[in-house]
Image: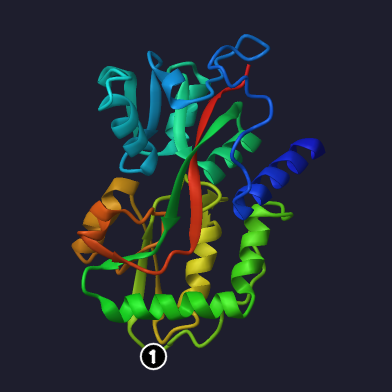
């Protein structure tokens, strides 16, 4: 990618990580066309009448359902639900939908890699947490203590700067050896790739901010890391409850509904939602 594009991406992601991005330069703000005639909404109301998409089971889907469909601002037939945001972006680029609602760091990453633009930010103030089975207080406490440990020893900051700051968006060289509980109980983690930069596939290998952070956290506990299992996002909670996995690390927002069925670690990341459109 061109150097100036890389610089824009890093600057935007760094601002996102710092919680400083609310409005975007270049948005018309009136829900009209951009300067080149493309669709450039400035608020959720501007999405009315347009085919839009989100990934199943995500906050983006909840925003569309609660703020648009339930409010009578969008026909249900105009909403397209996807198994992954990668598929949604393909449909957006191909002109099958006009906009996608998704987590802002993910929107910024797609903007840097694909022919899409972040049109505006919808503030939700959501917090991500690692999920464990309801009542699994031992793993919950271990993850909380491990999270605090990687914050204290600088690993969290290094990973965050690497994935959202001045790094190149690739894997970080972070020592996650720690006392990884080689003879202790196991934690098998579930995730849903296709959500950059949190969980992605690079050269067939699973990586991302969540992936490296979770492994570093477990290395600080008495638990042994038992590897990753990959699912569609909306299959993660059922898989956790069915004991196919022991934890979820997938940029999952802590909500009241989810908290009724699983338990969460302390929050490890905060974000809002972004709306992306086709680049013209």
**Looking at the picture, how far across and down is residue 49, in whole percent?**
38, 13
Residue beneath disc 1: 183
Regarding mark 1 in the picture, which secondary structure is present there?
loop
Q: Is residue 178 above or below residue 18?
A: below
Quarter of the image for residue 100 reads top left
Task: Using residue 237 as the reference point, say whether residue 113 is left or right of it.
Answer: right
Where 78 falls versus 114 (above or below)? Answer: above
**Residue reaching furthest to the top:** 37
Q: Is residue 232 visible?
A: no
Q: What residue is shown at x 38% (from left), y 90% (from top)?
A: 183
x and y, in percent, of residue 133 in the image:
24, 68
| Residue 65 position (above or below residue 149) | above
Tally of marks = 1
In-front residue for pair 74/155: 74
- How packed mark 1 is, by other alpha carbons closer than 10 Å (few <14, some 14-19, many 20 or more), is few
Q: Residue at x 62, y 61 (%)?
A: 160
Could one spot residue 57 in this view of the protein? Answer: yes
Q: Position of residue 220 (x, y in %)?
A: 49, 82
């Amino acid at each position: 990618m061109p150097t100036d594009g890389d610089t824009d991406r890093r600057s935007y992601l760094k601002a996102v990580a710092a919680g400083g991005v609310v409005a975007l330069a270049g948005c018309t703000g009136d829900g009209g066309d951009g300067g080149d005639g493309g669709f450039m909404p400035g608020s959720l109301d501007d999405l009315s009448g347009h085919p839009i998409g989100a990934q199943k089971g995500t906050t983006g889907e909840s925003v569309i359902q609660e703020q648009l469909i339930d409010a009578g601002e969008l026909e249900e037939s105009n909403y397209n639900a996807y198994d992954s945001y990668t598929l949604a972006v393909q449909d957006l680029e191909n002109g099958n939908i006009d906009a996608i609602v998704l987590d802002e760091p993910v929107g910024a990453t797609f903007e840097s890699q694909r022919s899409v633009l972040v049109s505006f930010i919808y503030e939700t103030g959501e917090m991500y947490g690692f999920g464990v089975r309801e009542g699994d207080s031992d793993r919950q406490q271990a993850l909380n203590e491990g999270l605090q440990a990687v914050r204290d020893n600088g690993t969290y900051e290094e990973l965050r700067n690497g994935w959202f700051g001045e790094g190149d968006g690739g894997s970080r060289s972070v020592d996650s050896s720690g006392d990884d509980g080689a003879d202790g109980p196991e934690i098998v983690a579930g995730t849903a790739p296709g959500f950059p930069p949190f969980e992605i596939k690079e050269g067939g290998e699973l990586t991302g901010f969540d992936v490296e952070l979770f492994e570093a956290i477990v290395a600080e506990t008495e638990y042994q890391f038992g590897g990753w299992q990959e699912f569609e996002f909306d299959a993660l909670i059922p898989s956790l409850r069915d004991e196919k996995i022991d934890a979820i690390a997938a940029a999952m927002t802590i909500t009241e509904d989810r908290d009724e069925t699983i338990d969460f670690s302390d929050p490890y990341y905060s974000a809002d939602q972004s709306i992306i459109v086709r680049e013209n």
